[in-house]
Image (spheres, rainbow, N blue to C red):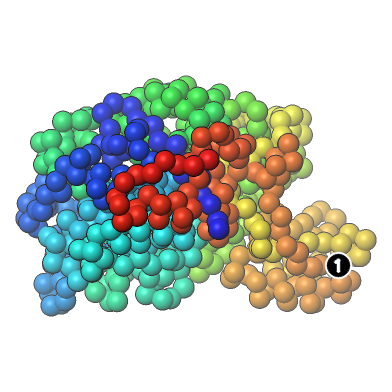
Amino acid sequence: MTATSAPDVLCIGQPRLTSGLDRMPRVGADAFGSVFGKLTRRGLPELIAMAQQVDLRGRGGAAFPVARKLAAVVRSASARGKRPVVLVNAAEGEPGSAKDLMLLLRTPYLVLGGAVVVANALRASEVVVAVTDEVMASSVRAALRRAPELRRLIQVVTVPRRFVTGEGGALVNAVNGRAALPPGRKVRASDSGVGGQPTLLSNAETFAQLAVLAMLGAAGYASVGIPGEPGTLLLTVGGSSDRPAVVEVPSGLPLGYALDLCGSSACDGVLVGGYHGRWLPAETAYDVPVSRAGLEAAGGTLGAGVVLPLGPGTCPIGEVARVAAYLAGESSGQCGPCKLGLPGVARSLAAVASGSGGLEALDAARRTAAAVRGRGACGHPDGVFRFVQSALTVFTDDIAAHLFRGGCGRPVRGVLPVPAANGDQRLALDWTRCQGHGLCAHVVPELIQLDEQGYPVPLAMPVPPWLERDARRAVEMCPALALRLASAAPVADERGQPARGLPASGRGQLSLRAGGRQRDGDLMVTEEWIADLTDASGRLRAIRD
């Protein structure tokens, strides 16, 4: 049985979404009322008015106003004469994020309750919870077994785990049984989503926030946080942190409080907003208010609440190059900026990190990243641009060391999480056979370029699905039989342990802890654990080591 290490949960100030988790491992059906109180049913006009009054935004990264989304679904459903669907996006393809995982494993009724509040207000035909992990799915199904009134309305769908799966169009495609890829043209879920019906699609945390809003009312909800963006937020703090955790904070709190609570070392910089976010200098990051406006004013972005500090023990540009290669491989391959531009960015950054590229490689990384912005079929190229360009701005000292001294002297420890590549394939060269024909670079230029001597240089990334056919063709056409497809092993850190990150499929052995080590007392979640907590007696049993 695959086990999942449930993220640590911390809180600064009065807990809301994390209420009860300081004294119980899971807020079950019987405990929900005593922890949160009664979940209040709200009519549609009232719910829209409350969401508008507190300016509630989606928590998946785009920060779209919830009130506008509700109104759009109502208009579409009325115009088409169809009942809407509510879709809970818990795909969480961002490797550094664990807040949706935490919510569905440890307080699932808060997410489900918020979805039901919305479904009742919209008179929706069903609620669909989309997850990428079987343990998350089992947690939700266990919650539904204890609540028959929810089971009649809610279904759980498991979708492929990829970075782009959480994009709205890709998620709708996956739920509808198609490939989990962005549609390539703008199709609003509010117009045509699950089964072609008008669909209210939002992130799992957003529905938890809606449940809190329904219970507290607008005034109660706004009693915490700053006036312009009231309430609390969930941050996933990882990277070079001694105690990585999901942290609930009131809006407006300086980010340094959360970093200090997690024992974070951030002398080089802090990534805010995940791999589509931006890097901030450490001195800026500690004082920046945790809010959309505060982070944007400092040059960052809130995104999905991912916070990844980099400490002194790892090579910053090497970490950035690893993530850039991962993001290039996670492309859908539906447009030129992704198919050619992102591998080019990754290749240039790898050359800078290795010390072999010089100023030409640095300039190529800047130019290529800028060239993909605003030209993709989805937001993926724009997100990679933000990640790369901000890194090149913040890590200037480290880049200078690589350009002029060949390196910074620090190893790449895998502090930034990248899913392990077990089972994936990479192009590999047998240098005892290679004669520098260069044919492979013409067949699959996205993955192979030629160096100054005309020899192939494969990009250090798994072959993405959309390039598998060309990669096999390059192998078959190699005159010297020097090229092959080899299974990719996870990158090891300096201790020989796998670099931190989530598995490519599922979340077996998810660990946000430093070096991937499990500490005494870590909560390991299995399907048996979930069933044990939600048995017919309704009593929480002790967790056995």
Image coordinates for residue 367, horizontal then vertical, percent = 57, 49
Residue topped by disc 1: 482
Q: Is residue 473 visible?
A: yes
Q: Is residue 390 visible?
A: no
In the displayed structure, does residue 191 sit left or right of residue 362?
A: left
Image coordinates for residue 456, horizontal then vertical, percent = 79, 60
Helix, strand or loop for disc 1: loop
Residue 194 placement: quadrant: bottom left
Crowd band around label 1 with a 10 angstrom C-alpha radius: few (<14), some (14–19), many (20+): some
Residue 159 placement: quadrant: bottom left
Q: Between residues 512 and 192, which one lies in front from this camera angle?
A: 512
**Quadrant position of the N terminus in the picture:** bottom right
Image coordinates for residue 500, horizontal then vertical, percent = 60, 43
Q: Between residues 425 and 41, which one lies in front from this camera angle?
A: 41
Find the residue positioned furthest to the right: 432
In the displayed structure, would residue 326 be above or below residue 185? Answer: above
Residue at the image position 40 percent from the left and 27 percent from the top = 258
The three-letter code of the residue at mark 1 reads Ala
Image coordinates for residue 292, horizontal then vertical, percent = 31, 38
* Number of numbered labels in the structure image: 1
Residue at the image position 51 percent from the left and 38 percent from the top = 522
